[in-house]
Amino acid sequence: MFERLIGFSIILLCFWVYEVNAQSSKIKRINEMYSFAVVGINKCADPDKAMPIFNEMLSYQETQFPNTFNGFCGAYDNGSAGCVILHKSRKTFDAIQEWQANDDKWLEFASQAWDYCEIDNFAFKQEILERK
């Protein structure tokens, strides 16, 4: 009985080690893929209405824009709202910014979300972090 318990414990330990290694590899790949981060932090009058729109806007952007990025929008503990977006490089960030300024559907999403947050168009605040 004791030998079976030890054998079963070793099998479980092997699965756990495998999962930890898989997660570690995934984090390393993500870390190597992105070198440019944009973090928005803004006051928002109604984040419960704005955040679903911001996330829908990001989903639309993912389907329309060919460059790789990853991110999400949400609310901070202090009531502010914002997005965290990871880009491959400053070049892909700049390309997305240019596309956003010229895409009518993206601008529609953004205007609606900015209205809920009471932010003037393109007057949101963002911080940029670039890997050196």
Image (cartoon, rainbow, N blue to C red):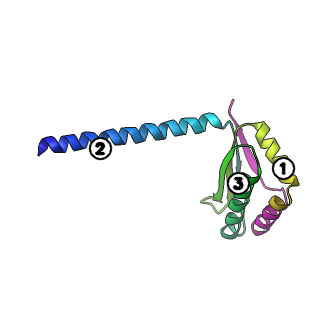
Q: Which quadrant holds residue 27? A: top right
Label 2 CA crowd tier, 10 Å (few <14, some 14–19, many 20+): few
Element at label 1: helix
Instruction: From this view, report whether residue 127 is shown above or below residue 109.
Output: above
Instruction: From this view, report whether residue 85 is shown above or below residue 46.
Output: above
Indicate the position of residue 119 as horizontal and vertical percent values: 80, 62
Distance from the alpha carbon under mark 2 to that under mark 3: 43 Å
Residue 121 drawn in magenta: yes
Distance from the alpha carbon under mark 3 to that under mark 1: 22 Å
Closer to the chain start, of discs 1 and 2, is: 2
Closer to the chain start, of discs 2 and 3, is: 2
Q: Amino acid at mark 3?
A: Ile
Distance from the alpha carbon under mark 1 to that under mark 2: 49 Å
Residue at horizontal 73 percent and vertical 59 percent from the top: 57
Between 92 and 111, the one lying in front of the other is 92
Closer to the chain start, of discs 3 and 1, is: 3
Between 68 and 34, the one lying in front of the other is 68
Residue 103 drawn in magenta: no
Please provide the residue range marked out in magenta. Answer: 108-132
Check disc 1 and report the residue beneath it: 99
Element at label 2: helix
Question: Marks 2 and 3: CB-CB under 8 Å?
Answer: no
Check disc 3 and report the residue beneath it: 41
Q: Amino acid at mark 1?
A: Trp
Q: Amino acid at mark 2?
A: Leu
Check disc 2 and report the residue beneath it: 12
Q: Which quadrant holds residue 103? A: bottom right
Instruction: From this view, report whether residue 2 is shown above or below residue 40.
Output: above
Label 3 CA crowd tier, 10 Å (few <14, some 14–19, many 20+): some
